[in-house]
Each structure stands twice: as structure tokens, then as C-alpha cells.
Image (cartoon, rainbow, N blue to C red):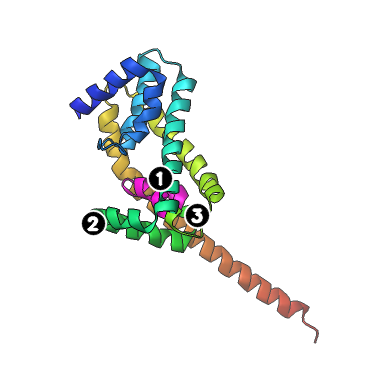
């Protein structure tokens, strides 16, 4: 991790804010850099390297969102060829299958909550692009708010935990997926209970209104 951090800091020294935009693209170029670390580093730099906070977040968020759009368009126009290359690894194949299952089950909302689940976050834009039911506009509408919230959380971690943000990011990344899945299950259960009560009430009301 130390070598990666040195590499990122050298990028910042050379390119400033542009480097924060490029952080999210480094995975595409072959550097196994967690997005969480990149977002937190941008926050750290805004607080301790005298970069403007709002400008730093803007460039970090723009890089994160533009990478997702690029991945979506790749999935849309390369589709089957791209997926056949990605699923060669067992782990990648499982992530893609989970992503497709989630989209089929939850629709575009799967794009939103995928940002909070490590691993699937990188594959979801490709998966969404390869499926006909997700338009470009719909992808942007569901991806943008989640990317903003996710990016803001890790950006703030970098600002307020300058000496330990790498360790904090690792711990949160593991727990965030678990917490979000539990919240999603809770929302689904609540929705089912609410729907059942509503249907029961409507049925009862129809019986009351029915002519005798």
C-alpha cells in the first residue's frame, strides 16, 4: 500500500487537481487501487496539502462518475465480448452473475446500492450497460446521487482521519456492504408488510362499500 500511496502523491505533485480526477481511472489502467482509498486521499489532500475542499471533491466526484459512464458505454457497445473476457476469473464471474441477478430483481435501484458494496461497484456499470432494460439516462439518474453520497463519505474520512484513513477505509469497506444489505432487507420487508396491509384495507373497504 505504501508504494501505491507514494505513486498517487507523486501524481498529485505533478498534476494537482487533475490527479484527483484520474484516481478513479487507475483501475482501468491496471493499478489495483481501491476506489475508497482514492476518494479518501482526495479528502486528505484538501485538508493537509492546502488544496481547495470543494474543488478537490468536484474533481474526485467527476472522475468517479465519468469512469462509471465510460464503463456503462463499454458494456453497451462491447457487451458480450467484454463480459466473456471479464468472466474468465471465478471471482469476476460470480460478481457479474450477482450484478445481473440484482438488476433483474431490483431494477435500476441495484445500480444505486452497488456503490456501497466493494467489488461489485466496479462491475455494475459494465453489467448495466450490457442489459437492454437500462438506458443511459436511467443509469446516470440512479448512479449520480449514490456516487455523490459514497464519494462524500470517504472524502470526509480522508479529511478527518489524516493519520489513519487507510485503516479506517479498510474497516468501513467491509462493514458498509453488510450494513447496506441489512438495510435493504429491512426496506424490502417493510415494503411487503405495507403492501399487504394496504391490500387488506382496500379489500375490507370494498366489502363495506359493496351494495347489499
Q: Which mark is residue 71?
A: 1
User: How far apart are the alpha carbons under marks 2 and 3?
Assistant: 26 Å
| Percent position of residue 84, x then y | 30, 58
The residues tagged by marks 2 and 1 sit, at their Cα atoms, a distance apart of: 18 Å
Q: Residues within 10 Å of mark 1 (few under 14, many from 20)?
A: many
Element type at mark 2: loop
Q: From what the image shows, is residue 3 above or below residue 137?
A: above
Residue 113 located within the stretch drawn in magenta: yes
Residue at 45 percent of width and 16 percent of height: 52
Q: CA distance from mark 1 to mark 3?
A: 16 Å
Q: Which mark is residue 88?
A: 2
> Residue beneath label 3, please?
108
Mark 3 Cα shell of 10 Å, populated few (<14), some (14-19), many (≥20): many
Q: Nearer the viewer, mark 1 or mark 3?
A: 1
Residue 135 in view of the camera = yes
Q: Residue at x 23, y 56 (%)?
A: 88
**Above or below for 145 versus 81:** above
Q: Is residue 183 left or right of residue 170?
A: right
Residue sitting nearer the eye, 63 or 175: 63
Choose the circle earlier in sequence order: 2 or 1.
Answer: 1
Q: Quadrant of residue 83?
A: bottom left
Query: Magenta residues: mostly which secondary structure?
Result: helix
For residue 37: magenta?
Answer: no
Residue 157, percent across and down?
Answer: 36, 28
Count the numbered circles shown: 3
Amino acid at each position: 500500500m505504501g508504494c501505491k500511496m507514494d505513486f498517487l502523491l507523486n501524481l498529485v505533485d505533478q498534476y494537482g487537481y487533475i490527479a484527483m480526477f484520474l484516481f478513479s481511472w487507475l483501475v482501468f489502467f491496471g493499478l489495483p487501487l481501491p476506489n475508497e482509498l482514492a476518494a479518501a486521499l482526495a479528502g486528505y489532500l484538501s485538508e493537509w496539502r492546502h488544496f481547495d475542499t470543494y474543488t478537490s471533491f468536484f474533481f474526485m466526484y467527476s472522475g468517479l462518475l465519468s469512469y462509471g459512464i465510460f464503463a456503462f458505454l463499454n458494456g453497451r457497445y462491447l457487451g458480450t465480448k467484454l463480459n466473456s473476457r471479464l468472466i474468465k476469473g471465478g471471482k469476476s464471474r460470480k460478481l457479474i452473475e450477482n450484478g445481473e441477478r440484482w438488476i433483474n430483481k431490483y431494477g435500476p435501484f441495484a445500480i444505486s446500492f452497488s456503490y456501497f458494496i466493494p467489488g461489485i461497484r466496479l462491475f455494475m456499470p459494465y453489467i448495466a450497460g450490457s442489459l437492454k432494460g437500462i438506458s443511459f439516462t436511467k443509469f446516470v439518474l440512479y448512479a449520480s446521487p449514490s456516487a455523490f453520497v459514497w464519494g462524500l463519505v470517504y472524502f470526509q474520512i480522508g479529511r478527518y482521519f489524516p493519520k489513519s484513513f487507510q485503516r479506517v477505509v479498510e474497516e468501513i469497506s467491509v462493514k458498509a456492504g453488510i450494513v447496506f444489505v441489512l438495510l435493504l432487507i429491512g426496506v424490502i420487508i417493510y415494503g411487503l408488510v405495507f403492501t399487504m396491509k394496504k391490500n387488506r384495507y382496500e379489500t375490507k373497504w370494498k366489502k363495506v362499500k359493496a351494495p347489499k
